[in-house]
Image: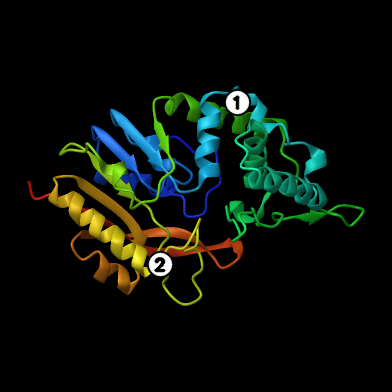
Amino acid sequence: MKKPFLKWAGGKYKLLDLLIPEIGQPNNFVDVFTGGCSVSLNVKSNNTISNDINRHLIGLYRSILCNDVSVFTEYFTDENCTEESYNKLRNDFNTLVSENSDSIEKYKLFIYLNKHCFNGLTRFNRSGGFNVPFGRYTKNDSDDKIVIPFSEESIKNIKTEIQNFKNSMDSCTFTCKNFDDMSLYENLGQDDVVYFDPPYLPLNKTSFFTDYFGKFGLKEHEKLSEIATELKNSGIKTVISNSSAVETESIFKEGRFIEILATRSVGANSETRKKIKEYITVFIPLF
């Protein structure tokens, strides 16, 4: 399987062996919440649309397709492995965000932040600023908070992953639309597949990752189910990932549930992991 170059909370790389057989090899494949792009990277289709509401993420992917990949690790230096440097570069990124910049500088900073922030989270505040704190750290002799610098080999591997992404996705269409923008599903037919990996329905009141890039609650899941049913009735197969919450079973009751076990971090500690039950729900056309 091809490995995505971004760290991504809730990424599906380790579940591809379960997802790919359900998706198959469609003519057209639409990845509506593409995130770290692990699914789009590994589905074999004639045409792929990778979509996400996060305009900075889609801008990054588009930028990679038309630039030399070596420039994207420019900030991976020993000097930039301190909390002070991280905060400065995060401010630089947020300045470019506030200016609606589409510059390569913004995307170099995006990758730096992704690799140096806490748990590889991508989170923006209500003002649109990236607000994830500095990552897991140790202390040096001066009692400064630092992360262990990336070795030359690690940086080379990141460049290779970005280049592999560029090679694999050069014919992909990247779009930045909301999931309920029906233009995403225009001109699809019986040999096509749509995949949804939305922010999960929470298992309990302490579950928090439902605000990926804007509000996504029960109302949005109900709308997603309506779209999946509409696609199914039009002869288009739909595959959906979600939690095993009771609401998942009721909202997506028109689909066929496949119970799987996924390894997830528990709480804020990325070292604490356990198997969590999740669902892959498949809406299969009747004809």
Query: In what element is the residue under mark 1?
Result: helix
> Crowdedness of circle 2 by 10 Å Cα count: few (<14), some, many (20+)?
some
Cα distance in 3D space between marks 2 and 1 = 37 Å
- Occupied quadrant, residue 103: top right
> Crowdedness of circle 1 by 10 Å Cα count: few (<14), some, many (20+)?
many
Q: Residue flagged by tag 2: what amino acid is it?
A: Gly
Vertical position of residue 248 compared to residue 112: above or below: below
- Occupied quadrant, residue 69: top right
**Residue 78: x, y in percent?**
80, 39
Looking at the image, residue 105 sits to the left or right of residue 256; the answer is: right
Residue found 54% across the figure and 23% down from its top: 66
The extreme left residue here reads 287
The extreme bottom residue here reads 205
Please give the label number shown on residue 69.
1
Q: Which residue is mark 2?
A: 217
Vertical position of residue 84 compared to residue 221: above or below: above
Q: Nearer the viewer, residue 1 or 63?
A: 63
The extreme front residue here reads 99
Please give the label number shown on residue 80.
none
Looking at the image, residue 280 sits to the left or right of residue 103; the answer is: left
Q: Nearer the viewer, residue 159 or 95?
A: 95
Dots 2, 1 in contact, CB < 8 A: no
First reached walking from the N terminus: tag 2 or tag 1: 1
**Residue 279: x, y in percent?**
31, 61
Q: Residue flagged by tag 1: what amino acid is it?
A: Val
Residue found 24% across the figure and 35% down from its top: 26
